Structure formats: structure tokens, C-alpha cells
């Protein structure tokens, strides 16, 4: 019996010793295998090259494409101070000398422009080159050229310049018309304050802005990309460097950018550009009336069921509307079956019609519905000052 107990004690001791050694050196031998859970996981991302990572947050490629086509426009014009009337008095000239007071002086200005064709046509704002008798264009690479004015359109504030170069010039690429959306990233390129070519970034804040009193014909792109004096005539491009507008104006009480800038959309700019290059001028339709918007008070006075349409406040004697029988006090409701909401829409609708064609105009006269055929005339050209007055 004693022998059996000793054998049992030795066996237990060896087992405990073996368990201690195994638990210390190979604990995994004592664990039960766990079932494998099958899950779907995203494949690990591959290392991204530094250049590709930079492109993800940079618009350098778009800027690099557009920068060579944006130019600086330097203008100057001769101004004369008025001749003092006492200078005609010989006694006055004897004591004070022959100070004629009419010595010419030169005023300078600056702005930006965009090369639109390889043979040297440049799109800019009319107010950049208005009344200038000397225009110089400086390219991004430092080359300078004398420029001549091909044509201007004060009512849209656009102008076309031309420079001559032996080599092909870097022309901008036009974006697809009406492809811009609110929220799109845009770059404004120009020469603000004359400091040199500058790129600012923002988004499109709104489209189709009008009734701003800037131009006669308005359809602005609004952006918060910083636009300052000197940016006028420069390019507003998309993130790929394609032209979507011509920077024209800012809303500011201090003269600096407040994050509200306006650009003429490329669809309008291209239409004006094509006409100026082909004919040297812009042709628009005209019927010779001065419209007035219908307020609730006017609607009540004229006993109109709604405030849609415009009241004819003036008819040009001998003009197309006068010859067609339209009278002061008529309410013009539609043109070519297109409803007219306000005076701005009437001007835009008539201007888009080719002169010489006839248009169907629907009017209300003393509760009577009338359809009148009006032969569209050619809109008279106006000066920049008159265009500004009409814009206001």
C-alpha cells in the first residue's frame, strides 16, 4: 500500500511540474481554438505619391493652363485742363506770364484682359479701355505689345482688343456655355491694384444676377473669389482652367473686395465677341418704347388682374412700336408668346430678336386683348455714359 501511494504522489508531482512547464513555455497548447469570423473589410490603401496627394487639394493645374492667356492692360489718355478766361487779357499775361492752363496731361489706368484667339484677339471690359488713346498689353511671359481697339459694347461693358505677334499666342479655352453651377470652385485671375498677376479662389455664389444697375444687359455670375480694382477684364475660370466669365465689378463700400464679385458669363461674352470681330459692332433688336414695371398700385389703377407685364410709358415717335400702333398706357404682356415679367426682361427679349423680322406682341388696352405685329428695328448705339445711365 505504501508503494502504491508513493507511485501516485510521484505521478501527481510530475504532472503538476509538466503542467507548470507547458503553461509557462507553451500556453497556446492549453487553449481551445476559436471559430474564425468572416468579415468584409476595405482593402488597405496603397501609398499615394506626394504629387498625387498635392493635386487632390490644389488647383495648380487649372491655374497653370489659364495664366498664360490672361494679360495686363495698361491705358493712357490725354486730358486738358480748361483754359482760364483771364489768359486772354494781355494785362493779366503781362503780370502773371503766359500761363495758358491748357497744357495736355496724361491719365493712366490699368486692368486685365483674356487672349481668346491665337492670332491676338483679347476680351476685356469696356470701362478698362474707355476713351484711351494708347493701350499696351503685357503678357505673362513679360512680352509687351501695342494694342488697338477692334470694337466696344458699352451696354454689356465688353470690348475687343487686337495685338500683332509673329508667334501664336496662348489662347484660353472656353468652358461649355451654361454649364456652371452654384457651389462650383472658380479661380479669378487678373492684375489687382497693379501688383502683378494674381490668382484667387472661391465658389460660384449665384447665377443670373440682374437688376444691379451696372450695365444695361445683365446676367452676372456672382462669386466670392476676391476681385479688386485691376481685376476688371480678367478671367474667371473653373477648376480645370476653362473660361466661364469675365470679371467686371465688385460690391464694395470701401473699394476693396468684400466677397461679392460679378462676372459676365462666357455665353454672353462670346456672343458679343463674335459680333464685334465679324462686324466691329453689336446689333440688337429695338421697338422704341420705354417700359415701366407694374406695381400693385398701377395694377389697381389700370384694373389689371395681376402685376405681370409692363406698362408702356413712352413711345418713340416714328419708331417701330409707334408705326405698329402701340400707345402710351398699353400693357405689354408677351413677345413671341414669351411672358414678360418686368422691364428688364422686355429689353433683353427684344434685343435678342434680329432687326427686320416681325414679332407678335400681345397687349392689353382698356381690358381689350390685342395681338400686334411689330417690325423689329435696330437698337441705336449709345455712349458709355448713356449705357451707365440706363444701367442705373
Image (tube, rainbow, N blue to C red):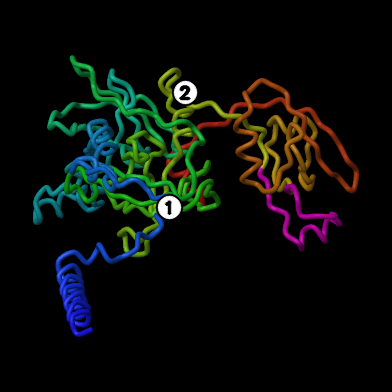
- Mark 2 residue crowding within 10 angstroms, few (<14) / some (14–19) / many (20+): some
Kindly give the residue lying farthest to the right in the view shown: 368
Dot 1 or dot 2, earlier in sequence: 1
Q: Quick one: which residue is furthest to the top in this view?
A: 166
Q: Which residue is mark 1?
A: 39
| Residue 335 visible somewhere in the drawing | yes
- Measured as percent of width and height from the top left, residue 363 is found at 81, 40
Task: Read off the magenta span.
Answer: 290-310
Residue at left 46%, top 46%? 221
Of badges 1 and 2, the one in the foreground is 1
Label 1 to label 2, Cα distance in Å?
Answer: 65 Å
Residue 388 position, x and y percent, is 46, 47
Residue 80 visible? The answer is no
Residue 145: x percent and y percent? 18, 26
Q: Nearer the viewer, residue 220 or 91?
A: 220
- Side of 299 where 39 appears, left or right: left
Quarter occupied by residue 124: top left
Which residue is the site of mark 2? 275
Outermost residue, front side: 1
Q: Is residue 382 left or right of residue 60?
A: right
Amino acid at each position: 500500500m505504501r508503494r502504491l501511494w508513493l507511485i501516485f504522489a510521484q505521478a501527481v508531482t510530475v504532472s503538476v511540474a509538466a503542467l507548470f512547464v507547458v503553461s509557462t513555455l507553451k500556453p497556446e497548447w492549453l487553449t481551445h481554438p476559436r471559430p474564425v469570423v468572416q468579415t468584409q473589410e476595405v482593402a488597405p490603401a496603397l501609398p499615394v505619391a506626394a504629387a498625387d496627394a498635392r493635386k487632390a487639394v490644389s488647383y495648380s493645374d487649372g491655374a497653370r493652363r489659364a495664366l498664360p492667356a490672361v494679360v495686363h492692360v495698361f491705358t493712357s489718355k490725354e486730358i486738358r485742363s480748361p483754359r482760364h478766361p483771364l489768359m486772354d487779357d494781355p494785362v493779366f499775361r503781362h503780370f502773371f506770364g503766359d500761363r495758358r492752363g491748357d497744357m495736355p496731361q496724361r491719365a493712366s489706368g490699368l486692368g486685365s484682359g483674356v487672349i481668346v484667339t491665337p492670332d491676338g484677339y483679347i476680351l476685356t471690359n469696356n470701362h478698362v479701355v474707355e476713351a484711351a488713346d494708347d493701350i499696351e498689353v503685357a503678357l505673362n511671359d513679360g512680352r509687351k505689345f501695342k494694342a488697338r481697339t477692334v470694337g466696344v459694347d458699352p451696354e454689356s461693358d465688353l470690348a475687343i482688343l487686337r495685338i500683332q505677334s509673329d508667334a501664336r499666342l496662348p489662347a484660353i479655352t472656353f468652358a461649355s456655355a451654361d454649364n456652371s453651377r452654384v457651389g462650383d470652385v472658380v479661380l479669378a485671375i487678373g492684375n489687382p491694384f497693379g501688383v502683378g498677376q494674381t490668382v484667387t479662389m472661391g465658389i460660384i455664389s449665384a447665377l443670373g444676377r440682374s437688376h444691379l444697375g451696372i450695365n444695361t444687359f445683365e446676367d452676372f455670375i456672382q462669386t466670392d473669389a476676391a476681385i479688386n480694382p485691376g481685376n476688371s477684364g480678367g478671367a474667371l475660370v473653373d477648376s480645370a482652367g476653362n473660361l466661364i466669365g469675365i470679371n467686371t465689378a465688385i460690391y464694395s463700400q470701401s473699394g476693396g473686395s468684400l466677397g461679392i464679385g460679378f462676372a459676365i458669363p462666357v455665353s454672353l461674352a462670346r456672343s458679343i465677341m463674335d459680333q464685334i470681330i465679324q462686324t466691329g459692332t453689336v446689333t440688337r433688336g429695338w421697338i422704341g418704347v420705354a417700359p415701366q414695371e407694374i406695381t400693385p398700385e398701377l395694377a389697381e389703377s389700370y384694373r389689371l388682374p395681376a402685376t405681370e407685364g409692363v406698362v408702356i410709358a413712352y413711345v418713340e415717335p416714328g419708331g417701330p412700336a409707334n408705326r405698329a400702333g402701340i400707345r402710351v398706357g398699353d400693357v405689354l404682356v408677351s413677345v413671341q408668346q414669351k411672358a414678360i415679367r418686368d422691364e428688364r426682361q422686355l429689353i433683353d427679349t427684344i434685343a435678342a430678336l434680329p432687326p427686320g423680322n416681325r414679332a407678335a406682341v400681345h397687349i392689353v388696352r382698356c381690358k381689350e386683348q390685342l395681338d400686334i405685329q411689330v417690325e423689329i428695328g435696330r437698337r441705336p448705339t449709345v455712349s458709355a455714359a448713356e449705357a451707365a445711365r440706363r444701367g442705373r
